[in-house]
Image (tube, grey):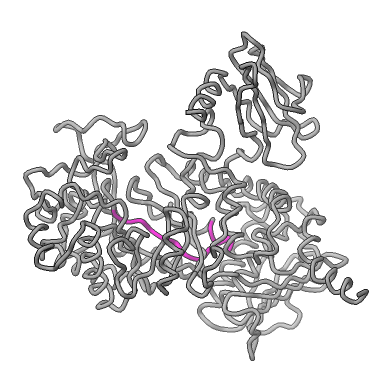
């Protein structure tokens, strides 16, 4: 019994120690972290030894740039050098446990050694090494008066899933080539390796298709609107359609190469048959209703009734039109040539069938093909599109709606409406990527709606951290991994993109990289906070919502308003006022649910850690809380 207890302690200790080490706070959590005594100190000239090869050079170029930029010391790379400060080594015989992306990192007082089976593993070992260095390593200028050291440690690490993605919606609002590169720079720090680019939607077509020039001449431009997406007034005829943009094919090649140099695969998405208004604006004959009701590229005005799933404007490609399949063959041919990744995502979501139901051509198609429902019509469309995709040597992927009416034979399902679609696809022995709204929609509000940029749902960091890609009872071999999705209806610039990504994308990263048994919320929160100064050094914006409490309200038996405040971060004190003044740490401290005074109109709260204010000052009208109680009781 004594031997069993000792063995358990040795097994568990790698997952406990990081939280106890102020200077070892790796994100995402490695498989094993064993701190050692001492530290490594960089000399004035840094020598890196690494084997020859193009992909290894991607790693050394990346590391050299980071070290030289921030530290300022000369950095030399050599294919030999037993005395090198940093040694990158590829295992000759391979280490089965490490796989393609795993690594072992050893920091001693004498040197730093990263071992891996493949260059990708070296790259991820470098990401971990950089997190061991002072936060100033993230600076884009040389920083002086810093002790450039790394704590001695032995780390073994490898990913749980091969698919570790982030989806970037560049269709609703266009983001430049430089923005996309910046997005890649940020995601790889947390070992995310799939960039899903949502390239087409009702609001814009963002990729040059040379055989169909109107897609970008017309489909890439709309009228700029500022406010709340879906509530904008329809553009009037003389408003300039000059807001938007697109990527040339050379731009795409450059982005794909940049991603490759950062060990990222780029998944292109062409969203059809719905969400196709930009394509239909360019080529009206692609819809069932034709040019007579052509609306133009959406500028964010309401084109659908979401309460009844009714299309107000025809944004669907027509499944009964053979020209649609010829059109898609041209699009997919050029897309397949630009993106070396083995998958092409063809959308399939939110295809409101309003105009299909009115179409004589669709009715004739249903009779000819013996299709009983509109879902079967969409399945017919998906199966034909899958054949086109496969004819280009690629694999067909779609959102979970492609399950309705019958899956295409080899389709890969990306499950977004919760996890049920992924469960069903896996039961049918199809590959699945999990990206459920419940945990992975990073465009949702991060804190209370009273303070966050408004959207229709909320996803707190703690909920995002609960993401588990493999549902109970599902064979894990069909779950390729998971990803976070960042839709951009309400995102106009990269600073807001960053605010929505971080730190929630860290929760996604840990859920798809780290061992399931290693996940621990309190430890994760501490490591998130350790990342914030590093993001500051990198001039990356992030949400401080972690420090803001959540508000829960109810009524007592005698009708009084009772308010519960729950912080997310560890060791926070909440101070409050009902008298309209601004609380600080000398105000009453929250210790139990609050009963609102009879005539009070406002609750103001702020969080502190010791004497340091941490959260934002939040002013919560009590009427808002009463309305939430009433809605809850309906």
Q: Residue at x 61, y 67 (%)?
A: 64
The answer to whether 436 appears left or right of 145 in the picture is left
Residue at the top extreme of this rendering: 599
In the rendered image, residue 25 lying in the magenta stretch gets the answer no
Which residue occupies the foreground of this view, 91 or 500?
500
- Expressed as whole percent of the image width and height from the top left, the position of residue 605 reads 66, 24
Residue at the right extreme of this rendering: 2
The answer to whether 501 appears left or right of 293 in the picture is right
Q: Residue at x 73, y 50 (%)?
A: 522
Q: Is residue 8 visible?
A: yes
Q: Is residue 252 visible?
A: no
Residue 600 position (above or below residue 483) = above
Residue 584 position (above or below residue 485) = above
- Expressed as whole percent of the image width and height from the top left, the position of residue 339 reads 35, 70
The answer to whether 248 appears left or right of 497 in the picture is left
Magenta region, residue range: 187-200
Q: Quadrant of the N terminus?
A: bottom right
Q: Residue at x 74, y 42 (%)?
A: 570
């Amino acid at each position: 019994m004594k031997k069993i207890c000792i063995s358990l302690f040795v097994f568990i200790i790698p997952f406990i120690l990081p939280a106890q080490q102020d200077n070892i706070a790796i994100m995402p959590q490695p498989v094993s972290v064993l701190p050692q005594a001492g530290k490594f100190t960089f000399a004035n000239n840094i020598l890196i030894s690494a084997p020859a090869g193009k992909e290894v050079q991607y790693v050394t170029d990346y590391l050299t740039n980071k070290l030289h930029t921030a530290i300022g010391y000369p950095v030399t790379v050599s294919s030999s050098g037993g005395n090198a400060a940093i040694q990158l080594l590829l295992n000759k015989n391979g280490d089965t446990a490490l796989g393609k992306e795993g690594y072992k990192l050893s920091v001693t007082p004498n040197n730093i050694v990263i071992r891996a089976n493949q260059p990708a593993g070296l790259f991820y070992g470098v990401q971990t090494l950089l997190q061991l260095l002072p936060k100033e390593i993230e600076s884009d200028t040389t920083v002086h008066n810093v002790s450039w050291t790394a704590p001695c440690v032995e780390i073994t690490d490898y990913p749980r899933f091969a698919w570790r993605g982030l989806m970037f919606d560049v269709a609703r609002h266009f983001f430049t080539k430089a923005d996309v590169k910046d997005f890649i720079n940020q995601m790889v720090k947390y070992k995310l390796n799939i960039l899903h680019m949502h390239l087409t939607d009702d609001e814009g077509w963002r990729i040059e298709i040379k055989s169909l020039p109107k897609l970008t001449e017309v489909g890439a431009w709309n009228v700029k609107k500022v406010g709340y997406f879906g509530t904008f007034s329809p553009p009037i005829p003389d408003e300039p359609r000059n807001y938007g943009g697109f990527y040339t094919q050379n731009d795409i090649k450059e982005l794909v190469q940049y991603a490759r140099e950062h060990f990222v695969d780029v998944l292109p998405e062409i969203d059809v048959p719905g969400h196709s208004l930009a394509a239909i604006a360019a080529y009206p004959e692609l819809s069932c209703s034709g040019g007579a009701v052509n609306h133009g590229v959406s500028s964010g005005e309401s084109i659908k009734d979401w309460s009844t799933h009714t299309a107000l404007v025809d944004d669907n490609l027509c499944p009964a039109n053979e020209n649609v399949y010829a059109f898609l063959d041209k699009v997919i041919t050029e897309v397949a040539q630009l993106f070396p990744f083995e998958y092409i995502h063809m959308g399939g979501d939110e295809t409101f069938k309003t105009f299909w139901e009115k179409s004589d051509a669709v009715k004739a198609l249903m009779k000819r093909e013996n299709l009983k429902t509109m879902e079967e019509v969409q399945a017919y469309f998906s199966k034909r599109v899958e054949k086109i995709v496969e004819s280009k040597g690629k694999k067909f992927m779609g959102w979970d709606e492609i399950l309705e009416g019958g899956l295409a034979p080899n389709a890969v399902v990306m499950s977004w409406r919760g996890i049920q679609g992924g469960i069903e696809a896996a039961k049918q022995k199809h590959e699945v990527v999990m990206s459920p709204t419940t945990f992975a929609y990073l465009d949702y509000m991060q804190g209370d709606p009273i303070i966050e940029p408004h959207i229709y749902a909320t996803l707190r960091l703690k909920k995002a951290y609960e993401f588990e890609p493999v549902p109970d009872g599902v064979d894990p071999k069909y779950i390729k991994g998971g990803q976070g999705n960042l839709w951009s209806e309400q995102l106009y610039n990269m600073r807001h993109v960053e605010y929505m990504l971080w730190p929630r994308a860290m929760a996604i990263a840990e859920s798809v990289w780290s061992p399931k048994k290693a996940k621990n919320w309190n430890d994760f929160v501490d490591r998130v906070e350790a990342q914030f100064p590093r993001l500051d050094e990198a001039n990356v914006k992030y949400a401080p919502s972690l420090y803001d409490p959540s508000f829960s309200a109810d009524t007592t038996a005698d009708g009084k308003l009772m308010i519960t405040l729950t912080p997310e971060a560890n060791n926070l004190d909440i101070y409050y006022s009902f008298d309209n003044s601004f609380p600080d740490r000398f105000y009453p401290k929250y210790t139990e649910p609050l009963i609102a005074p009879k005539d009070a109109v406002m609750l103001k709260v702020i969080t502190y850690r010791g004497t340091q204010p941490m959260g934002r000052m939040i002013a919560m009208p009590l009427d808002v809380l009463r309305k939430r109680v009433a809605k809850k009781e309906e």
